[in-house]
Amino acid sequence: MTRIRSALRNLPVHIVLLGMCAIWLIPALGLLITSIRPFQDVNETGWWTVLSPPTGAVEYSQSCAGCHGADGRTVPSANLSDPQFVSAFRRSFTLLAALKAERKDQPGTPHMGDTPVPDEQTTAKIATYLRRLSGIDAHPTFTLNNYVDALVGYRGTNSYVADCAAGTQSNDLHCDVSDLGNPRGMALAFVNSLIVAIPSTVLPILFAAFAAYALAWLHFPGRQLLFAILVALQIIPLQMTLIPISRLYAQLDMNGTFLGVWLFHTGFGLPYAIYLTRNFLGGLPNELFEAIYLDGASHWTAFWRLAIPLAVPALASLAIFQFLWIWNDLLVALVFLGGQHPVMTYQISTMVSSKGSGWHLLTAAAFISMALPMLVFFGLQRYFVRGLLAGSVKG
Ligand code: HEC
């Protein structure tokens, strides 16, 4: 009885949790499915129709299959599985004219006999299906071509794989491994993103650990004031510094260099990193440090042997946040790197056309850029949760 009552009490919580999962999972699923559908399908139907029959299949089986057969071969003089035959009826109005015409073998009889002739829209769908049935537009339900296109930055009307096979690819691509270095592709952008994100994560956290140790365990005058200033620095919005820093970088000839972005991210990561790490280190028990100092250890030893190992969960969760923020950052990358060293966010922003097409590329590119954060998150999840808890218990 009590168990049922407590289950009922938890029911709203479970419903809310399920709802939140659905809100997150359904769009993610849509993104994933769209990214593995051929672009012809993406342009025609939504991702949720992926398991329903292809466009026009139902209409074909209702109006035409009775005479032409499910495979289109039943009438030998009108073999609908022959690409050459069907290509004469590619356009829906030629097909509609043929459907309204009299039968060639029996003049006077309408083509479709007693079956009603479909309307224009239905005919268009049937025409689409005939192109698929005959192999003119043959394509599988799922494909990885979008990922290849996104990686090499291919924006032809057909897929890179198909165009390379036909030898009709555009001239800046060679259909070999060297295409992965294409400046418009996600492969190069992935490498650029790593080059930006790794030092921009490691540097601030390293410096923050030093500073936090000093602020927590070195007793020098003015350290509270220094800490207060650091906390206050977090208020400054990043956007305010874009102009002064880009002018400074222009004088130093550092615009468009990785060094410039590393320094920028380090500068803006430091205040919060110091704040969090100092609070964590300051919350560690006094006795531990007194004991190690009594043993004659220097601050250097105390830092590396005691403070850092204890602070690993806090530093790891900090690293996750910093890494994710830099990985997803577009503003700084756009201003200081631009197209010179395109990172993934920049590359994705160039993939949607102004008319909103190119979804198949965009979704694949989005998944490529999501892959690493997901790995980092799930790989470091243990630390992540522990670090969060540690931060909340010792403020
Ligand atoms: C009552 C039976 C029947 C139905 C229903 C029917 N067809 Fe046909 N169709 C035929 C026959 C028989 C021929 C071959 C004789 C001819 O060409 O007139 C033919 C010929 C054709 C041709 C070639 C016409 C030409 O001008 O060469 C096309 C294309 C075609 N059918 C498409 C369709 C499609 C699409 C549908 C469904 C919307 C359909 N047919 C429904 C019996 C049928």
Image (cartoon, rainbow, N blue to C red):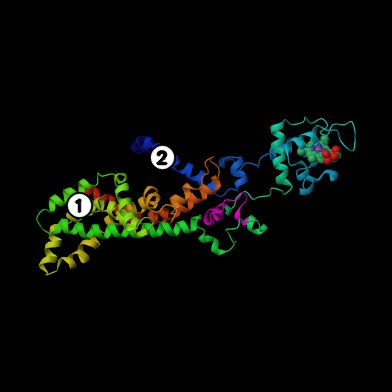
Q: Tell me where residue 106 appears, x and y as whole percent.
A: 90, 35
At a point 37% along the width and 59% down the height, the residue shown is: 258
Q: Examine the image and state in which quarter residue 311 appears.
A: bottom left
Q: Examine the image and state in which quarter residue 100 appears.
A: top right
| Residue underneath mark 2 | 20
Label 2 CA crowd tier, 10 Å (few <14, some 14–19, many 20+): few
- Direction from residue 311 to residue 108 in the image, left or right: right
Q: Tell me where residue 333 appears, x and y as whole percent.
A: 39, 51
Q: Examine the image and state in which quarter residue 221 appears.
A: bottom left
Towards the viewer: 379 or 4: 379
Q: Tell me where residue 346 appears, x and y as whole percent.
A: 44, 50
Q: Is residue 50 visible?
A: no
Magenta span includes 100? no
Can you tell me which quadrant of the image ligand 1 is in? top right
Check disc 1 and give the amino acid type.
Asn
The Cα–Cα distance between marks 1 and 2, rounded to whole angstroms, is 32 Å
- Direction from residue 168 to residue 259 in the image, left or right: left
Mark 2: secondary structure: helix
| Residue underneath mark 1 | 279
